[in-house]
Every structure is written in C-alpha cells, then in structure tokens.
Amino acid sequence: MNIKKITPVLYADELEPCVKFWSERFGLQKTVEVPDGNRLGFVILQKDKVELMYQSYSSARKDAAAIASEIEGGRTFLYIEVEKLEPFIAATKNANVVLPVRTTFYGATEIGVKDPAGHVVVFAEMGAQQS
C-alpha cells in the first residue's frame, strides 16, 4: 500500500480572501478555480510540491450534500514544517496571530495564525533556537 499524496481541503464561506492570504503572504499560486455563481466555489493553490485546496460551503452543499453537515462550521489545524521560520514570521505580520512565536519541548520554534476562514496554520522550524 502506497500513499502518493495528501492534500488538505479547507472549507470557507468565501474563498477569495483565502486565495489572497496564501498567494500574497506565502507565494502559492492558483492553479485551478471553479466558479460557483459570481464567486469561487473551489480552488487549488500550489507552490513547488505543496498543494492546498479550498471549497466554499455553498459549493460543498451542492457537490456532496450527504456530508455537508459534517463540513459546516468545521475548523482545520495545519502544522507546516518549514526550513527557516524567519521568512514566515515576516509573512504573518498583521495577520491574526493566535500562537505567538514559541519554542516547544520537542525542539520546534513555531508561530500560529488564522487564515481568513478561521483555520489555524502553525509554521514550525524543527531544531531551531528561539531568538
């Protein structure tokens, strides 16, 4: 049994602010977009081997009505290991920081922010020393 890839799908009322968050702060590019009326209903963002998907609640209700109640209101927590934390600290300036920079007992230096949809994203440099 081989897993080739895992891609998180995050849900939001509006996708446009999430696209802006990831593209302007972290350099991910929109590679796929599916409209839902005059808004985005689904989008894939990529940078190198990193891929992230967002789907609107409205689109999800139409696409997968059987599990829509499971999707509604759920929040996701992403833990993203990075090579160097400093650029991510700079990129999260004026973002909704919910976990200020800290060093953990397991040797990671981390910072956590909320994306525009309320999902918590923690960036971590393993084995780093806090400044």
Image (spheres, rainbow, N blue to C red):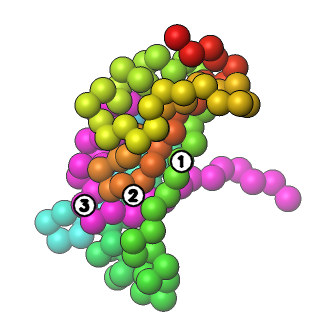
Quadrant the N terminus occupies: bottom right
Image coords of residue 117 (percent x, y): 33, 56
Image coords of residue 128 (percent x, y): 64, 17
Label 1 to label 2, Cα distance in Å? 13 Å
Image coords of residue 124 (percent x, y): 57, 30
Q: Which residue is mark 1?
A: 78
Is 3 contained in the magenta span?
yes
Is 85 displayed left or right of 73 in the figure?
right
| In-front residue for pair 31/100 | 100
Residue extending furthest toward the left: 38
| In-front residue for pair 72/34 | 72
Q: Amino acid at mark 2?
A: Tyr
The residue sitting at 45% across, 49% down in the picture is 120
Label 3 to label 2, Cα distance in Å? 9 Å
Residue 26 in view: yes
The quarter holding residue 27 reads: top left
The residue sitting at 51% across, 21% down in the picture is 85
**Which structural element holds mark 3?**
loop
Is 11 displayed left or right of 93 in the figure?
right
Q: Nearer the viewer, mark 3 or mark 1?
A: 1
| Range drawn in magenta | 1-27
Q: Are marks 3 and 2 in contact (CB under 8 Å)?
A: no
Earlier sequence position, callout 3 versus callout 2: 3
The residue sitting at 41% across, 42% down in the picture is 98
Q: Which residue is mark 2?
A: 54
Q: Amino acid at mark 1?
A: Leu
**Which structural element holds mark 2?**
strand
